Image (cartoon, rainbow, N blue to C red):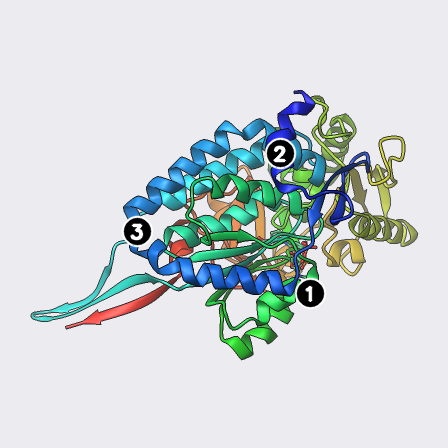
Amino acid sequence: MTDSATTGILDAVTVPEGEGRPIPDAATREVIGHAPVHTVADLDRAIDAARAAQPAWNALGHTERSRLLHEIADDLEAHADELAELLSREQGKPLNGPNARFEVGACAAWTRSAADIALEPEVVFEDGPVRAEVHYDALGVVGAISPWNWPMMIAVWQIAPSLRMGNTVVSKPSEYTPLSVLALVEVFNRHLPPGVLTAISGDREVGAAIAAHPGFDKIMFTGSTATGRRIVESSANNLARLTLELGGNDAGIILPGTDVAAIAETLFWGIFINTGQTCASLKRLYVHDSLYDEVVDALAGLARQMPMGAGLSEDNVLGPLQNEKQFDVVTRLVDDARERGARIVTGGEPAPELGPLFYRATVVADIEDGAPLVDEEQFGPAIPVIRYSDVDDAVARANASEQGLGASVWSADPDAAVEVAKRLQAGTVWINNHGAINPFVPFGGVKASGYGQEFGAAGLKAVAAPKVISR
Ligand code: NAD
């Protein structure tokens, strides 16, 4: 891939030096471009434009909007290389592995699924001449606030269903990864009427202004639980509907009798996908005593083997932490585990020879609940492996978290695993997998991981106003 591969879209979205925020390459810290720093006044203008554009966009109808979404997905695929390269540099995730190319592919796939899912009126009651139907109308203007870990894909999860349902959208990327989302929106806007979709690349204050703004009918938010709580408080004033996809501290439970060699690689990627910076990745692993050493060795062996380094090198499948704040969180949690006497099986330290924000893939054994590495969301490449001897006890410990995004059960007997899955408090429980998502299958959390669902018909309903027509 040549430098010129990124010139088109990156040039279209960057502003001259001195007029915006310098955005570093996550691996090398070289400046890759300057992002506009939009203000609350820019936000007000974007909302006015979105409001003005919404009736005509809604009037186009589902068929035409779906056609345009497919056209956008084609264009995302046509620009996949340059989008993946920009994403890899800004976010840090390598091109290969379940990383940048995968993310751009998912953007196209989720755009197409939002176009294709049927959402017919539902007849909910019928008795002779009496009949009640639920129709799904556009809500109006959607505010979409996204995080830095899967910046393009999560923005698409918010934008594509909202557009499909006849809403217009103002999208705010994370201040850490604005260029990726600006580039994505640039491709969308080559196909959309003016005002239908605007990216506002502002700071956290602009995020707060979105949450409090009376101009939004719905806020889609993906980010931390702490910010989610603030958004709920703001919604007391504007009564915007909310979908909150918040943090996770997903548990995985490996049942006795599991074929460790057969699951090892899937388990590894369930933990280390995007170098552990994934909302629904496995963050606490409970392993039955009979398999404990085998699982720890298998994970540590894979952690040592997987190439880590700058994302643009085709060899690498693990990258840096995206930002210094997250690097500090991972460092603090692993250092604390070591000081408590936990065993660092592999990793446990930064990899400065690769760049300032690299941290080695880390497996921590002989650690218990109560250690911050177990109880808090590490959001990085460090997995605590906890020993258990009684499945009921493992379920109780998995459920002890305030969060409930995902969970997984690993077993040679999938039926036995389903029985354990039924007892876990999470929005999704995977069997012999963790974090596998599908645009047709609803996704969302319980407890402090938020509320509302994305994807599939449930995701379309979440950005629509149900209207009952009763006769
Ligand atoms: P964050 O909450 O710090 O920021 C998320 C977004 O909110 C950013 O765009 C930010 O600018 C904006 N923001 C900041 N303050 C705001 C406010 N007061 N009001 C409105 N918006 C505000 O989260 P992050 O650090 O970018 O992302 C990491 C977190 O996101 C992790 O906890 C992770 O688990 C979670 N996450 C969840 C999912 C999911 O689907 N459940 C997906 C990805 C990430």
Disc 2 from disc 3: Cα separation: 33 Å
How far, Cα to Cα, is label 1 from label 2?
A: 28 Å
Query: Residue at 58% of width from left, 68% of height from top?
Result: 211
Q: In this orientation, does residue 212 appear?
A: yes
Q: What is the quadrant of the N terminus in the image?
A: top right
Residue 53 placement (x, y as % from top left): 41, 57
**Label 1 beta carbon less than 8 Å to ligand 1:** yes
Instruction: Give the labeled residue for mark 2.
Output: 100
Residue 237, percent from left and from top:
54, 79
395 shown above or below 345: below
Q: Is residue 400 visible?
A: no
Mark number for residue 60?
A: 3
**Earlier-in-chain disc, 2 versus 3:** 3
Q: At 85% across and 34% down in the image, what residue appears?
A: 355
- Tag 1: residue type? Glu
Mark 2 is on which residue type? Ala
Q: Mark 3, residues whose alpha carbon is within 10 Å: few (<14), some, or many (≥20)?
A: few
